[in-house]
Amino acid sequence: MSALRRKDREITDPAEWREVLDRADSCRIGFAAGDESYVVAMNFGYRWTDGRLSLYFHCAREGRKLEFLSRNDRVSFQLDADRKIVTGETACRWSMEYRSLAGTGRLARVSDPGERIEGLNRILAHYGGAGQAPCESGELEAVLILRLDVETLSGKRQPGCLTA
């Protein structure tokens, strides 16, 4: 699944992928259509089903990301966690510790009412909102839920990062 140059920094364990997902506070999605591109950071939740990863997002029902989505449903994504600046005696000795995941997949609007609620609940749970009162019907209809079905995934650990 991965094409990392530095195999010694590669994250291949699905349990560590989940740790990075659990600790990340946003996911950046890259869109491309024609000669234009667009990257946006979004709140997210996720689901593993039969070894397949899906990421859920919520957004308004109109905007630039949806214009790009209507032209091309193939996207890339990146998220990271455990970031820490490592200072050095000279500028060239500074570094950053982190763990990250990146990949590609297809992004789709979720229309099924049950999956819309599941997606929103997974986003809420990711940020500590599990157990919140459900949305009222008008509130849920105002929000668009998107699902990214991940097709490729790679992980990287910059040296010095904790694995827990």
Image (spheres, rainbow, N blue to C red):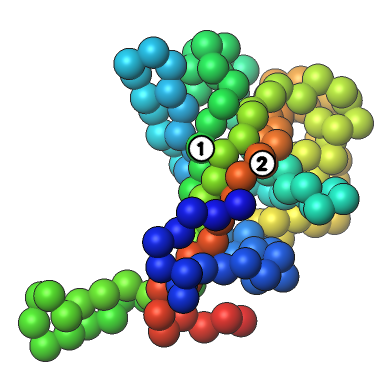
Q: Residue furthest left?
A: 90
- Which residue does the numbered mark 2 point to in the structure image? 150
What separation in Å lies between label 1 and label 2 (alpha carbons)? 9 Å
Q: Residue furthest bottom?
A: 89
Return the mark for residue 76: 1
- Please name the residue shown 81% across and 20% down the image: 111
The percent coordinates of residue 88 (x first, y second) are 17, 85
The percent coordinates of residue 89 (x first, y second) are 11, 88
Question: Residue 33 appears in which quarter of the rendering?
Answer: top left
What kind of residue is marked 1?
Answer: Ser
Instruction: In this rendered view, identify the residue nearer to me: 26 or 53.
Output: 53
Return the mark for residue 40: none
Left-right relation of 34 to 65: left
Left-right relation of 79 to 121: left
What kind of residue is marked 2?
Answer: Val
- Please name the residue shown 70% across and 22% down the image: 109
Quick check: can you spot residue 138? no
